[in-house]
């Protein structure tokens, strides 16, 4: 039985499709080295199966708020809270992980954890993540985000 590779390109595709469906948000390539995002947070969702590891997202809280606005039709009567933004980032990773692992491995079963609570990142942590070799940086709704795949040994 052949299983597809779980890599950052497949994660980008799964997150892109999920964002389009959830919030009418598109991922765009980053043309030049991006500036550091404002107040990024880190979310991780682990999976276990014939391949084990984690899918990772580093994004500003404002990106989570943009997802909330996109998903609710942009109701501007009340700005999304930080908690709602965190929930949106966790749900994005949850849905994308389920779609990616199901799509890429139809005959394989994976145990998928709940996404971690978003944790604030320092500038140094952001730089280390995007330069780790396991992450890709893209733009969405004016925010710079990074998506990564970490496979267990």
Image (spheres, rainbow, N blue to C red):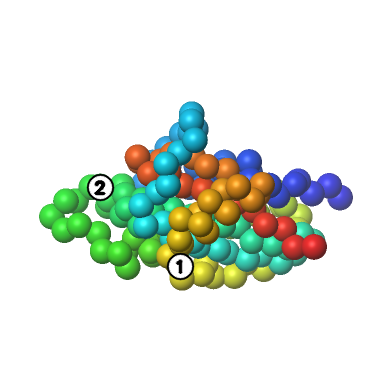
Q: Residue furthest top?
A: 31
Q: Position of residue 143 (x, y in %)?
A: 38, 44
Q: Is residue 127 above or below residue 47?
A: above
Of pointers 2 and 1, the one earlier in the residue sequence:
2
Residue hosting label 2: 73
Residue occupying the point 42% across, 47% down: 36
Q: Work out whether residue 76 or residue 107 is closer to the camera in this orientation and state it.
A: 76
**On the image, which quarter does residue 60 sit in?**
bottom left
Q: Work out whether residue 72 or residue 138 is closer to the camera in this orientation and state it.
A: 138
Q: Tag 2: Cα neighbours inside 10 Å, few (<14), some, or many (≥20)? A: few
Residue occupying the point 16% across, 51% down: 76
Real-space Cα separation, disc 2 to disc 1, in angstroms: 27 Å
Q: Work out whether residue 149 or residue 33 is closer to the camera in this orientation and state it.
A: 33
Q: Position of residue 26 (x, y in %)?
A: 42, 37
In which quadrant is the C terminus drawn?
bottom right
Residue occupying the point 44% across, 53% down: 59
Which SS class for mark 1? strand
Residue hosting label 1: 119
The mark total stands at 2
Q: Position of residue 122 (x, y in %)?
A: 45, 61
- Camera sees residue 17: no
Q: Residue furthest front?
A: 124
Q: Is residue 72 above or below residue 136?
A: below
Which SS class for mark 2? loop
Residue occupying the point 56% across, 57% down: 56
Q: Work out whether residue 122 or residue 5 is closer to the camera in this orientation and state it.
A: 122
Q: Tag 1: Cα neighbours inside 10 Å, few (<14), some, or many (≥20)? A: few
Q: Is residue 29 above or below residue 53?
A: above
- Camera sees residue 32: yes
């Amino acid at each position: 039985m052949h299983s597809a590779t779980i890599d950052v390109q497949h994660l980008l595709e799964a997150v892109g499709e999920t964002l389009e469906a959830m919030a009418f948000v598109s991922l765009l390539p980053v043309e030049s080295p991006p500036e550091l995002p404002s107040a990024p947070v880190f979310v991780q969702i682990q999976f276990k199966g014939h391949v084990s590891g984690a899918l990772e997202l580093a994004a500003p809280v404002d990106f989570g708020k943009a997802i909330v606005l996109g998903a609710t039709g942009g109701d501007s009567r009340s700005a999304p809270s930080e908690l709602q933004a965190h929930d949106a980032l966790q749900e994005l990773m949850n849905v994308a992980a389920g779609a990616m692992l199901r799509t890429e491995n139809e005959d394989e079963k994976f145990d998928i954890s709940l996404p971690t609570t978003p944790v604030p990142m320092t500038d140094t942590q952001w730089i280390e993540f995007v330069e780790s070799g396991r992450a890709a940086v893209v733009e969405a709704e004016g925010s710079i985000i990074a998506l990564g795949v970490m496979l267990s040994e």
